[in-house]
Amino acid sequence: METLTAQLKAQNDQARARLPQESLAVMDDATSTLAASGITDTSLAVGAAAPDFTLPGVDGEQVSLAKLLTDGPVVLAFYRGGWCPYCNLELRALQAALADITAAGATLVAISPQLPDNSLSTAEKLELAFPVLSDVGNVVAREYGLVFSLPEDLRSVYDGFGIDLPAANGDQTFELPVPATFVIDRDGSVAWRFVDPDYTHRGDPADVLAAVKAL
């Protein structure tokens, strides 16, 4: 099976071939600016204590990190939303790896700032069998050092694509998390992480699984 990294590259190549150069320039500039902000270095580091949280799942049930950790390590995947094709590729790849992650003793959880109804739509569309949590207002993502605000020119580009972030997230902040994956050991510390301001890059499930097995 093709790796997630290869799928993401193919998606990006196709997108860059069809999108207007003006839009690509705005998107590339925003990515470069975000990378230069140092957000990767200021986000939650390996060895740090993972902030606890309690968030609603698509079924309305409250899910807490502390409770999940009583059963073993936890894989936290922060994604932008179901409107993002790169997020959808990542979530599908994680679903494909779910059996292996579970067999290795870990629990997989995905988190986005989407409203619960939109998280439910994402989970149903992609047939996800792991918890998909709604971090409305990016409260938890902020504690993990992942939150940034879309610049004005990029908001216009997204609007042209039909992406309505206020409707997806229920606020007017235009804030998103940098896509990131954390492997949390059962003692609550970060054992491994992938944080990249370039939203076309994600932690590959093979690397996530290797990190879990290394615990």
Image (spheres, helix red, strand yellow):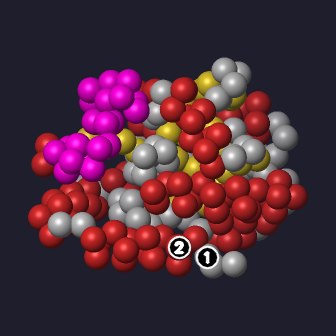
Q: Residues within 10 Å of mark 1 (few under 14, many from 20)?
A: few
Q: Is residue 209 above or below residue 174?
A: below
Q: Position of residue 136 (x, y in %)?
A: 46, 27
Residue found at x 56% / y 59%: 90
Q: Quadrant of residue 37?
A: bottom left
User: Which residue is more in the foreground, 124 or 44?
Assistant: 124
Residues at circles 1 and 2 in contact by the CB criterion of under 8 Å: yes
Q: Is residue 105 above or below residue 51?
A: below
Q: Position of residue 58 (x, y in %)?
A: 64, 29
Dot 2 corresponds to which residue?
A: 7
User: Which residue is more in the foreground, 13 or 113?
Assistant: 13
Q: Is residue 115 above or below residue 76?
A: above
Distance from disc 1 to disc 2, alpha carbons, whole Å, reads: 6 Å
Question: Could you tell me the amino acid type at mark 1?
Answer: Thr
User: In the shown orientation, is residue 25 left or right of residue 209?
Assistant: left
Question: Could you tell me the amino acid type at mark 2?
Answer: Gln
Say which element carries label 1: loop
User: In the shown orientation, is residue 206 left or right of residue 115?
Assistant: right
User: In the shown orientation, is residue 112 left or right of residue 95?
Assistant: left
**Which segment did they paint magenta?**
155-174
Q: Quadrant of residue 62?
A: top right
Q: Is residue 74 magenta?
A: no
Dot 1 corresponds to which residue?
A: 3
User: In the shown orientation, is residue 196 left or right of residue 211?
Assistant: left
Q: Residues within 10 Å of mark 2 (few under 14, many from 20)?
A: some
Say which element carries label 2: helix
For the C terminus, the image quarter is bottom right
Q: Position of residue 19 (x, y in %)?
A: 24, 67
Q: Is residue 82 above or below residue 27?
A: above
Q: Is residue 162 magenta?
A: yes
Q: Position of residue 194 (x, y in %)?
A: 52, 61
